[in-house]
Amino acid sequence: MGRDGHGLRLPHVPRPRPSLDGGRCPSRHTDGRPGRILPHPLARGRARYVALPLPRRGSHDARHDRHLSSFAVKRPALVAVIALLVAAAPAAAAPHRADVNVEYSAYGPSQLDVLPGTTVAWSNESTRTHTVTAYDGTFDSGHLEPRARFQVTFARPGAYRYHCTIHPSIVGEIDVRRVILDTLPTAAVPVGTRVELSGTTADVGKPVRIEQRASGSRFTTVARTTAGRSGAWHVGVRASGTGDYRAASGADVSEVRRLLVAVQKVHIHATRAGVGVDVTPSAPYAPILVEFYLRERFGWWPVARRRLDYVSEAELHVPRGVRVRVVLVDRDGWTPLATSRAVVLPRR
């Protein structure tokens, strides 16, 4: 960057190197006991063993175990996995299934929202051995060899955090809820856009409320719909401003999800020293990203972070002959809210 903090130079682009370790996350020690490998009379075909979790002492543990069952089938690449549900969930919706891939250095997806009664199946798609082990010991796959599978049926709402005991940085979470709101658009949508919200609920045929919360306010109902026979629901809302959304059915609520709405517009123009930027409506001191179009990166690449001044403007010094644009971003410093057109300073 320039000496005064405002000049921009073309960044040095190092040759990318493959990474095998993935992100580092804190690990916790589980208090669960390892499972035993036992012959199971229900296994058929080539499935020969089923790993059942050892019973644990204590009334709390016993109550928790009655609501969740799990086991892993050894060498199940060519066989079907048998599901076992100990406690029937009170949900009225039909049973659901979800899949999680166990990759070389991560679970994919690492976080999953499911309804009560859902069976989640993990499949080891990597070339090394992993485990799927709950921190509280409620389920444990034991060693999962490549192509092995393991599944758990979740009967009660709650958050179930788990990890790989062989590689503690690999962590995941299953959130069991009676009402689910699907993910919202990650990029900002123009103000006034009709956004379709969707999800599922365990209460088939029951009303579902969509609640919105603007910054510093309480949740208020902005839309209503009714779940279908499968528990699925969908409804449209008009995007009036950035805020948090959640779905509610009776006293049950979903995870809160944020919807970004682009109210501002970013204007950019060439100056003698570089480019000038202004945003309307005014957004004093808002964060912006300066991006260059780099052929070696095959697209736009952020090269600097700046903030608008008190009148919602900025002056940037950029190299001539380079395509540049400015992105107004959310408070996290990355999520785009509005993007300017691209300009190129002519070479002298």
Image (cartoon, rainbow, N blue to C red):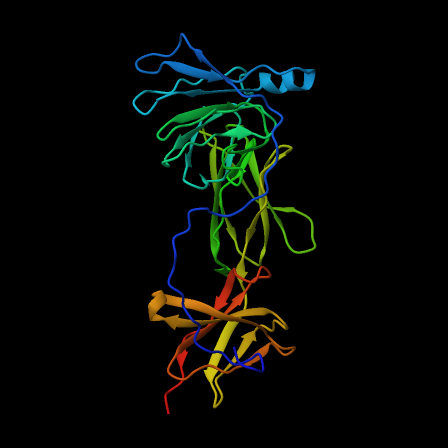
Q: Position of residue 116 (x, y in %)?
A: 53, 26
Q: Position of residue 135 (x, y in %)?
A: 59, 30
Depth check: 282 or 117 in front? 117
- Position of residue 114 relative to residue 140, above or below, is below
For residue 69, say whether it is visible.
Answer: yes
Q: Residue at x 66, y 56 (%)?
A: 215
For residue 210, say whether it is visible.
Answer: no
Q: Residue at x 43, y 82 (%)?
A: 319
Depth check: 144 or 122 in front? 144
Residue 82, image quadrant: top left
Depth check: 321 or 190 in front? 321
Picture quarter with the C terminus? bottom left
Q: How many marks?
A: 0
Depth check: 113 or 209 in front? 113
Q: Position of residue 322 (x, y in %)?
A: 39, 79
Q: Position of residue 142 (x, y in %)?
A: 48, 24
Q: Residue at x 63, y 72 (%)?
A: 285
Q: Is residue 229 left or right of residue 137?
A: left
